[in-house]
Image (cartoon, grey):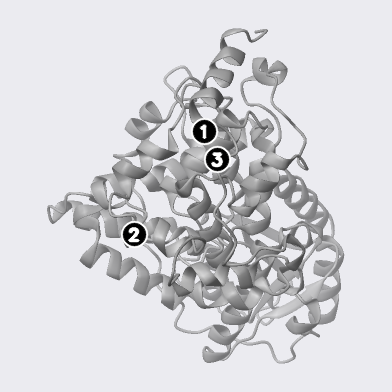
Amino acid sequence: MSENAPLIVWFRRDLRLSDHPALAAACKTGRPVIPLFIHDNQSDALGAAPKFRLGLALACLGDTLKEKGSRLILRRGDALDVLRDVIEQTGAGAVYWSRLYDPAAIDRDTKVKDALKEDGVEACSFAGHLMFEPWTVETKTGGFYKVFTPYWKSVRGRDVAEPLATPSEIRAPEDWPDSDVLDDWQMDAEMQRGRDVVRPYVRLGEAAAQARLGSFIADIVDGYDESRDMPGEDGTSGLSENLSLGEISPAHCWHAGQRAMQEGKRGAETFLKELAWREFAYHLMYHTPRILDQNWREEWQAFPWNEDERCAEVLAWKQGRTGMPFVDAAMRELQVTGRMHNRGRMIVASYLTKHLMCHWRIGQKWFEEHLIDWDPANNAMGWQWAAGSGPDATPFFRIFNPETQLDRFDKGRNYTRRWIAEGREKPSEDALEYFDAIPRRWGRRPDDDYPDPIVDLSEGRARALDAYRNRDF
């Protein structure tokens, strides 16, 4: 490769400059670097909220690169076709990227790597989205882990490399290739009027992610064991949004958690476990990709879940109108912020799959459309964990009661007051924003009556347990 032949760094879900092995390796060569993002069919297939959040992240990354004297090139089309076109236009001799682990990305990247090598172009992939790549963690018998606790025991003592610094220089090419204009992609179009409601809740970009981690370690992690379950408190890191698009690396979070644990902060090990849970989700997705769209436990294929996405009960669940305040508050938080507290996610998932006996795929798809922190592995494993059909799942007969859960985790009703407007003389601004975010066709108003429960909790629980006991597997 000529000393001045540029290298392309193909950005995907790694939208940062620090602790970026592919970018660091490219810069280390001393050659010009062309940062590139390709809007291919995989990013085009994202749901409304993840696509909206990706568009914001790309704009932010572009601004960050400008500050370094570089720029982000944007192209739309088939990944291999785009790469070949940029290579032809610039004379680039190599393409570097960070590995992804879902089956569609693996298939695309394998084809790209093989084709580029046949073209005589260097193609190198690097770690970075995970700390423990799936094929590097094995049981004593050589298989993959199916239960989290032994997985955690296997990885918790592993060395994780210190985060790489931001490159001091990203050498620009003499001539830049053509670039699309981000606004022309209209990545926020599918959000419709919800876009302006959700936007203020976004903590965008690498600098915001680093600040978020710093505040969490300084002010929250010590009490994290308890606070993470309290949806009415600011008791979590909030970093899932940034980790999902790689605005911060998991290794950066891991080392911050390790330092906090060494300082005696009580909740630090629990935070590390949560990071490992994310890794475990990818471990399972890589080894058993069926987790994304099929019951991981194959015997659950015969379970009699309702699969009618248009039935009245599912519509009430989606709208946050089930008559169960904990469920409804969580579903409204999702509409307004693009996120949902983890305790809320467990409650709404249990309620849909057990009290309403609806298939977990219905909920998974709803989250795919509405979460700004959507992650393919975490979303799939989370839903199957709650439903009972997945690896390391909560037993199906463990059915969360939304009323007792509310009494336990929202005693002062701060969470439900924040998100539910009906029946209140002076609803909170957050509760009122829900009516600005939802589709007009729903016809909902703050002065509507709050609904009666759509299902009696005892009857719903009994129906679910009866189906479980009489299952045909």
Q: Residues within 10 Å of mark 3 (few under 14, many from 20)?
A: few
Which quadrant of the figure contains the C terminus?
top right
For the point 82% across and 71% down, the residue is: 76
Q: Amino acid at mark 2?
A: Asn
**Closer to the camera: disc 1 or disc 2?**
2
Residue of label 2: 414
| Above or below, 263 relative to 86 | above
Mark closer to the chain start, 2 or 3: 2
Q: Are marks 2 and 3 in contact (CB under 8 Å)?
A: no
Front-lying residue, 280 or 335: 335
**Closer to the camera: disc 3 or disc 1?**
3
The local secondary structure at tag 1 comes to helix
Residue 390 percent across, percent down from the top left: 56, 27
Residue 416 percent across, percent down from the top left: 41, 56
Residue 465 visible in the shown view: yes
Mark closer to the chain start, 3 or 1: 1
For the point 58% across and 19% down, the residue is: 463
Q: Residues within 10 Å of mark 1 (few under 14, many from 20)?
A: many
Front-lying residue, 375 or 6: 375
Residue 134 visible in the shown view: no
Residue of label 3: 453
Residue 104 percent across, percent down from the top left: 74, 46
The local secondary structure at tag 3 comes to loop
Mark carried by residue 238:
none
Q: Are marks 3 and 1 in contact (CB under 8 Å)?
A: no
Residue of label 1: 386
Residue 101 percent across, percent down from the top left: 62, 45
| Above or below, 294 relative to 184 | above
Q: Amino acid at mark 1?
A: Ala
Whole-angstrom CA distance, mark 3 to mark 1, is: 21 Å
In the rendered structure, the answer to whether residue 289 lies left or right of residue 41 reads left
